[in-house]
Every structure is written in structure tokens, then in C-alpha cells.
Amino acid sequence: MGQVEVEQTALPGIGLRHDFTTRAGRRVGVVSHRTGRRDLVIYDEDDPDRACQTVTLNDEEADALAELLGAPRIVQRLNELHQQVEGLVSVQLPIPADSPYAGRPMGEARVRTRTGASVVAVVRGGRVVASPGPDFVFQAGDVVVVVGSHDSTAEVADILARG
């Protein structure tokens, strides 16, 4: 699979535009305004310089779209990485209601320090929080995506279940 080439264009007084062309020949872009507003742009098939659809997104909507598009890619890239690096696994570990870490910040579990494994994402209610920081508070029902060796990820499962 080839790399997608993204073109970046400065828009003086407005912000930046990033565009790429899909394999099917459709041109898609995102205009990031200096104000923080983002516009998702679909260009005309017959005239790739003319926008035929523009959808304005606020911060929350842009984040939601990025998560919807990014979550499957994160899992796919982890799977590709597994094929390249022997002994590396990723597991999805639920936070049970009786977990000693439900309602507590992730940093208190000291997962990396204790096991060498890394928490790369947390899935909560269908939304993905990529690379959560130590202040991220686990909730019962969260699914924690952990990358490490078989042994270290098993240790993380034990920590999240029993402390």
C-alpha cells in the first residue's frame, strides 16, 4: 500500500489547507483556520480546484471525526507492527467495576514502571482516547489498549484487576 501524499498550502490571513487525492481520484482537504475552526472540503470531480461540499467542524466535532477515522487505523497499525516485531503484542483489557483503579488516575497504577508495558489508548463508550496521560482517570467499563510482551501485558491485566 502506497503512502498518501498530503499537500500543505498556507492561506494568508486564514490558516492552512491540507489536501490529498484518494485512490479513486477524489480530492479531499481540511482547512484549519487561525480561529481554530476547521472545514472539511470535498472538491468537485470535474474541477479539483473547486469545492463542491464544505462541512464546518467545531473542536468537538473535529475530535470525534478524527477518532472515528483514527481508531481503526491505530488497531491496524498495531497489527502491522506485531508482524514486524517478534514478541510484541497488544491486548485490550477491561476495567472491571471492582478494579482498584476504577475512578483513579492512570498514573497511580504505574503500569510502565511496574511492567515495562505501555498504555497506548483507552476506549470509553465507543470513543478512543489515544496516548492518555497519567492524569487520565479510569472508569469502570473502559477498555485499556496495552502494548508490550506477553508477560508484561499479563502483568498489566493483573494490576488492573487486582491492584
Image: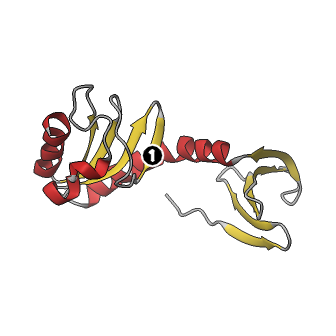
41, 59: nearer the viewer: 59
Q: Quadrant of residue 34?
A: bottom right
Q: Position of residue 35 (x, y in %)?
A: 77, 60
Q: How is the image coloured?
A: secondary structure
8, 110: nearer the viewer: 110
Q: Position of residue 129 (x, y in %)?
A: 45, 46
Tell me the quadrant of the picture where the C terminus can be found.
top left
Write the residue at 39% across / 46% down. 75
Side (left or right) of 25 relative to 90: right
Q: Decide: is 103 above or below 56.
A: above
Write the residue at 22% across / 32% down. 99
Q: Is residue 12 visible?
A: yes
Q: Position of residue 70 (x, y in %)?
A: 51, 48
Label 1 element class: strand
Q: Is residue 72 visible?
A: no
Write the residue at 25% across / 28% down. 96
Q: Which residue is mark 1?
A: 129
Residue type at tag 1 = Val
126, 69: nearer the viewer: 126
Q: Classify mark 1: residues with Cα within 10 Å, few (<14), some (14-19) or many (20+).
A: some
Q: Decide: is 54 above or below 13.
A: above
